[in-house]
């Protein structure tokens, strides 16, 4: 996919590692593509969302405030993800320091810390009835409903890239958030698009369509 990023802006902006076709605009200091799609499956760049990684030792009390390993849940508008041992990702739209507000990170037994990794990670979302079939072409995890239901989180290899995967259904449609190291973002995005060709996958922010087809896989 050719690089469609514009060369200059009047003010400094943050840029995603993922390049998409279409017009770019600046939203909240981030350069974002305004491409939309109503295809059966859509792939969206969400690298602009705030991403914080939090780590804690087994005896630290903050663990009680976070989801168990291989699961995710929302705390308000912040998605908390337990996709690795003693490690959580917090994903949302707030400034980094507000993402951890209210969590008992300081004090107590053990050790806990957090780091803003927003600019070091690529984040994308794939949505559609057949997303499980598409992802199964690229990874070995069983994505059947009974095995990896909504809110499941795990770390695996997708197209050879170590990726954190969070099932986060949207408006009744199966949907997955995937994030990886920034340097692998463009490659993973293009690999997903290629694997999704037979399912009608298109890049762009999903726009409202008719009622979704029930997903019973």
Image (cartoon, rainbow, N blue to C red):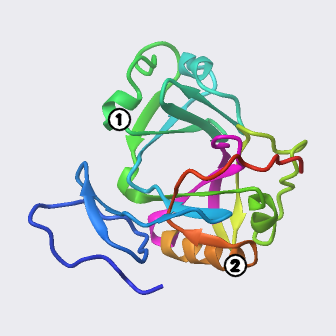
* Residue 63 appears in the figure: yes
- Label of residue 196 in the image: none
Q: Is residue 148 magenta?
A: no
Q: Position of residue 64 (x, y in %)?
A: 61, 17
Disc with the residue nearer the chain's start (1 vs 2): 1
Residue in view at x 75 percent, y 71 percent: 138
The residue closer to the viewer here, 129 or 68, is 129
Using the numbered discs, state the Cα–Cα distance from disc 1 to disc 2 in whole angstroms: 34 Å
Residue in view at x 38 percent, y 39 percent: 93
Looking at the image, is 180 positioned above or below residue 172? below
Looking at the image, is 141 positioned above or below residue 21? above
Residue in view at x 74 percent, y 72 percent: 199
- At mark 2, the secondary structure is helix
Q: Residues within 10 Å of mark 1 (few under 14, many from 20)?
A: some
Q: Position of residue 47 (x, y in %)?
A: 43, 57
Proximity of marks 1 and 2: CB atoms separated by less than 8 Å: no
Side of 213 where 7 appears, left or right: left
Q: Residues within 10 Å of mark 2 (few under 14, many from 20)?
A: few
Comparing labels 1 and 2, the label whose residue is closer to the camera: 2
* Residue 165 appears in the figure: no
Residue in view at x 46 percent, y 71 percent: 183
Q: Which residue is mark 1?
A: 94
Magenta stretch in the rendered image: 162-184
**Which quadrant holds residue 153?**
top right
Q: Which residue is mark 2?
A: 197
**Which quadrant holds residue 136?**
bottom right
Side of 30 where 21 appears, left or right: right
Q: How many marks?
A: 2
Q: Position of residue 10 (x, y in %)?
A: 9, 65
Q: Is residue 179 magenta?
A: yes
The residue closer to the viewer here, 52 or 63, is 52
């Amino acid at each position: 996919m050719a690089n469609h990023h514009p060369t200059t802006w009047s003010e400094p902006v943050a840029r995603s590692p993922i390049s998409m076709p279409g017009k770019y605009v600046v939203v909240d200091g981030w350069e974002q593509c305004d491409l939309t799609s109503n295809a059966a499956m859509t792939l969206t760049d969400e690298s602009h969302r705030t991403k914080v990684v939090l780590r804690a030792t087994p005896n630290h009390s903050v663990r009680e405030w976070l989801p168990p390993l291989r699961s995710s849940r929302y705390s308000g508008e912040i998605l908390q993800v337990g996709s690795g041992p003693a490690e959580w990702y917090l994903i949302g739209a707030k400034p980094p320091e507000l993402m951890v507000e209210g969590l008992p990170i300081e004090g107590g037994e053990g050790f806990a810390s957090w780091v803003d990794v927003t600019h070091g990670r690529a984040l994308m979302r794939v949505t559609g009835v057949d997303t499980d079939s598409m992802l199964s072409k690229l990874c070995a995890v069983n994505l059947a409903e009974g095995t990896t239901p909504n809110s499941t989180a795990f770390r695996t290899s997708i197209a050879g890239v170590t990726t954190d995967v969070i099932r986060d259904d949207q408006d009744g449609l199966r949907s997955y958030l995937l994030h990886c190291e920034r340097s692998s973002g463009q490659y993973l995005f293009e690999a997903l698009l290629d694997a999704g060709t037979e399912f009608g996958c298109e890049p762009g922010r999903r726009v409202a369509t008719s009622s979704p087809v029930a997903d019973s896989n």
